[in-house]
């Protein structure tokens, strides 16, 4: 069930960096009809490589706990590639301290796990705003 029209985010690209396969599959299902191109990475380093290969990526959903390096370290390298990149923390570590650390580290927003579907669409919608008549 999608809360956005088909192809609403056509022309936009989203990268999810998460070592949890079910999470990536779930997000993929949520975005399947959105028209957005979805890239996936199991590790922060793989995410960095994808960003280098695909500078058109608009939003990164980044898990804070990864097998190679954590999200707080990864966001630094991602912002070296693109200082204006929208990076959304995506984690089960939901405390006010973690949320504040995310803000300080340069994350654009925060999505807790498990995902709340309306909040997920609303958060992405804050950063993927279609402009009528413009191909993204």
Image (tube, grey):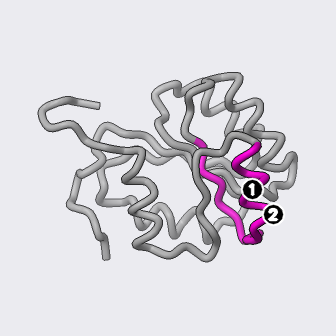
Q: Residue at x 63, y 69 (%)?
A: 112
Left or right of residue 48: residue 117? left
Residue 68 lies, in percent from the top left, at 87, 47
Q: Secondary structure at mark 2?
A: helix
Q: Is residue 100 magenta?
A: yes
Left or right of residue 26: residue 74? right
Query: Can you name the residue that lies furthest to the right here?
Result: 68
Q: Nearer the viewer, residue 39 or 57?
A: 57
Residue 93 sits above or below residue 130 on the image: below
Q: Quadrant of residue 132?
A: top left
Q: Which mark is residue 97?
A: 2
Q: Residues within 10 Å of mark 1 (few under 14, many from 20)?
A: few
The residue stretch that appears in magenta? 87-104
Kindly indicate whether the residue at mark 1 contacts the one at mark 2 (C-beta within 8 angstroms).
Answer: yes
Q: How many numbered marks are there?
A: 2
Residue 54 lies, in percent from the top left, at 52, 27
Q: Quadrant of the N terminus?
A: bottom left
Q: Residue at x 71, y 52 (%)?
A: 42
Query: Can you name the residue that lies furthest to the left here?
Result: 133
In three-dimensional space, the C-alpha distance between marks 2 and 1, rounded to whole angstroms, equals: 5 Å
Q: Secondary structure at mark 1?
A: helix
Residue 124 lies, in percent from the top left, at 43, 54
Q: Quadrant of the C terminus?
A: top left
Q: Which residue is mark 1?
A: 100
Q: Nearer the viewer, residue 69 or 49?
A: 69
């Amino acid at each position: 069930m999608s809360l956005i029209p088909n192809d609403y985010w056509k022309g936009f690209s989203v990268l999810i960096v998460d070592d949890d396969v079910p999470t990536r599959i779930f997000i993929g299902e949520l975005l399947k009809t959105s028209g957005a191109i979805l890239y996936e990475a199991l590790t922060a380093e793989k995410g960095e490589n994808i960003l280098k290969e695909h500078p058109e990526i608009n939003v990164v959903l980044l898990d804070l706990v990864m097998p190679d390096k954590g999200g707080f370290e990864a966001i630094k390298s991602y912002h070296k590639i693109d200082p204006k990149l929208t990076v959304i923390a995506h984690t089960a570590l939901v405390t006010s301290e973690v949320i504040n650390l995310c803000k300080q580290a340069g994350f654009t927003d925060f999505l807790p796990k498990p995902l709340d579907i309306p909040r997920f669409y609303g958060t992405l919608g804050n950063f993927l705003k279609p402009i009528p008549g413009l191909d993204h």
